[in-house]
Image (cartoon, grey):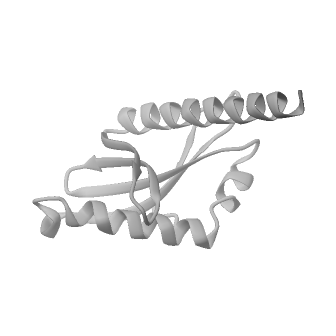
């Protein structure tokens, strides 16, 4: 019984995370970005959203939290290192990598509010 409840909580958290990522992607699209990849995974790390606007690539970490501050502070230095490592792998696989500039953003998704996009977060 306890294992089932634990599995239910994990599934609920996973669904909440995916919904937050879709809300963040919509926010970015409305700001003029094109979503290049979602949940890009490498053995070094994962990037929630890779978005492009012109020659700018935004590697976006999405955090669903109760407040903006909670979301921002939830991105640890370890997570930042993993995102940077994954972004280097992604960038190396792009044919036009020499033209692209890279930026690391956070989108905070809070209940009953429009997502907030913090550019150049780390």
Residue at the (57%, 38%) spot, across then down: 115
In terms of depth relative to the viewer, which is nearer, 36 or 3?
3
Residue 57 percent across, percent down from the top left = 30, 56
Residue 122 percent across, percent down from the top left = 51, 69
Q: Check the image and report above or below for 1 versus 76.
A: above
Residue at the (30%, 65%) spot, across then down: 89
State left or right for residue 6 relative to residue 45: right
Residue 112 percent across, percent down from the top left = 70, 27
Q: Residue furthest left?
A: 95
Residue at the (31%, 39%) spot, across then down: 32
State left or right for residue 80 relative to residue 16: left
State left or right for residue 71 relative to residue 5: left
Residue 75 picture quarter:
bottom right
Residue 117 percent across, percent down from the top left = 52, 48
Q: Check the image and report above or below for 101 versus 18.
A: below
Q: Check the image and report above or below for 75 versus 34.
A: below
Residue at the (80%, 28%) spot, across then down: 4
Q: Check the image and report above or below for 76 versus 42.
A: below
The quadrant in which the N terminus is found is: top right
Counting every numbered tag in the picture gives 0
Residue 87 picture quarter:
bottom left
């Amino acid at each position: 019984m306890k294992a089932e409840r634990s599995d239910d909580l994990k599934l609920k958290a996973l669904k909440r995370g995916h919904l937050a990522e879709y809300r963040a992607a919509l926010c970015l699209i409305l700001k003029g970005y094109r979503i290049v990849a979602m949940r890009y995974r490498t053995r070094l790390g994962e990037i929630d959203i890779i978005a492009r606007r012109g020659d700018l690539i935004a590697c976006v970490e999405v955090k669903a939290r109760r407040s903006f501050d909670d979301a921002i502070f939830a991105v640890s230095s370890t997570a930042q290192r993993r995102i940077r490592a994954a972004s280097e792998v992604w960038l190396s696989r792009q044919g036009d990598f020499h033209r692209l500039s890279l930026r690391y953003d956070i989108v905070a998704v809070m209940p009953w509010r429009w997502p907030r996009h913090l550019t150049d977060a780390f």
